[in-house]
Amino acid sequence: MSSILGAHREIVALDFESNAFVRIGLRPTKTRSILQLMRLYLLLIRQGVKAGNIRFCEKTPRNVLHVPAIRQVFKGGAKFILMIRDGRDILTSVHPQKVDYYIPIERWMNDTIETLKYAHDDDVLIVPYESIISHFDLTVTKICEFIGSEFDPRMREFFKYSSVQAHGAFHKGRPEKIYKSSLDRWKDNAHSERVRQVNSNTKATELLDDVEQFINRFISDLT
């Protein structure tokens, strides 16, 4: 998502996870807010982000746990794009810098519950990964409308134009085209034990149903 947004002419996406907000805490003070903004501004300057850019994008997964605090820091000036995905594909994902599944079931559940909590908030757009793959232009146009920008055709070839051209989470160290093969990975027999663990967790299976319903509604509304 950050790579796609970083291909827009009006957006600069940071090519690293700054963790600029994770120290704010759930009860930010005015002093903490000022310090975090100062830290973020220094990071932007270091990245060469100029004042003429209309927006910047900062992607740190744990931001989802600090939405109220970030709102307070930016006084309503921030927009939140939260990603959601079939949990079984997330839980059978292997990070390029790790040798095993790197997302614990409990973390996926906690982050997903936190994400869905904001489903009806005006400053939040929850985007299914599956929708980007199946309806790229429609999904990205919706994202652009949400942030108040026109769709930029360069976003179709984000892997060429994005300000995010390297990241530790990319399997080859750089952004690539989106492939449908990344869907339903969990159906591979190699992940049968992991899937069994998920299916044996009643709360996890209930959450999977909630996520599936959300994804279906999003795509239905989109088309």
Image (cartoon, rainbow, N blue to C red):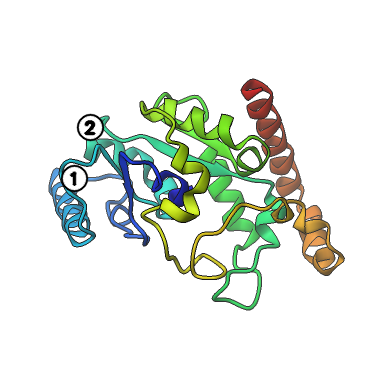
Q: Secondary structure at mark 2?
A: loop
Q: Say which mark, if any, is on residue 29.
A: 1
88 or 135, which is in the foreground?
135
Q: Is residue 38 above or below residue 220?
A: below
Q: Residue at x 74, y 38 (%)?
A: 209
Q: Residue at x 73, y 55 (%)?
A: 181
Q: Amino acid at mark 2?
A: Lys
Q: Is residue 183 above or below residue 212?
A: below
Measured in 3D between alpha carbons, the distance from the residue under mark 2 to the one under mark 1, in whole angstroms, is 13 Å
> In screen coordinates, is 118 left or right of 105?
left
Residue at image mark 2: 75
Expressed as whole percent of the image width and height from the top left, the position of residue 124 reads 44, 32
Expressed as whole percent of the image width and height from the top left, the position of residue 70 reads 30, 42
198 or 174, which is in the foreground?
174
72 or 157, which is in the foreground?
157
| Residue 117 can be seen, yes or no | no
Q: Secondary structure at mark 1?
A: loop
Q: Is residue 90 above or below residue 174?
A: above
Where, by quadrant of the figure, is residue 28 drawn? top left
Q: Residue at x 59, y 54 (%)?
A: 177
41 or 51, which is in the foreground?
51
Where, by quadrant of the figure, is residue 113 drawn? top right
Q: Residue at x 38, y 30 (%)?
A: 147
Expressed as whole percent of the image width and height from the top left, the position of residue 1 reads 49, 47
